[in-house]
Amino acid sequence: MLVIEVDGAFAWCEGRGRRERLNTLLLEEVCAGEWVYAVLGQAREKLTVQRVTEINLALDGLAAALQGETNLDAYFPDLMQRP
């Protein structure tokens, strides 16, 4: 999720159509504009833009699979490059 505003040990974050207040105590410092991985209201780790792109593609692939799409290669380019 993208950090929008930091308020002490918490941050307002947005991502995939949601806005959520996350506890950031597990991270040293969080600044607006950074991306974080969140689980159950906790910011767990900072993410690079590349990793955010990979995660969003994978989540889009999961949604496509649930809608019945069977050609999912475009959603997992990192897996397609492996031997």
Image (cartoon, rainbow, N blue to C red):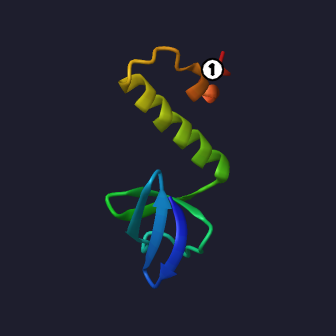
Residue 16 position within the rendered picture, expressed as x and y whole percent measured from the top left: 47, 51
Instruction: Name which residue type carries label 1.
Output: Met
Residue nearer the viewer, 66 or 38: 66
Residue to which mark 1 is pinned: 80
The answer to whether 21 is drawn above or below residue 6 in the figure is above
Q: Residues within 10 Å of mark 1 (few under 14, many from 20)?
A: few
For the point 40% across and 69% down, the residue is 22
Name the residue at 65% across, 52% down.
49
**Within the image, what quadrant is residue 25 found in?**
bottom left
Find numbered disc 1 in the image and state the secondary structure of the residue it sits on.
helix
Q: Is residue 57 left or right of residue 67?
A: right
Residue 41 at x, y = what percent? 34, 63
Q: Quadrant of residue 69?
A: top left
Q: Is residue 61 above or below residue 7?
A: above
Give the residue furthest to the left: 40
Report the number of numbered marks. 1
- Position above or below: 24 against 47: below
Is residue 33 found left or right of 25 in the rendered image? Answer: right
Residue nearest the observer in this picture, 18 or 48: 18
Q: State which quarter of the image contains the C terminus.
A: top right
Residue 28 x %, y %: 53, 74
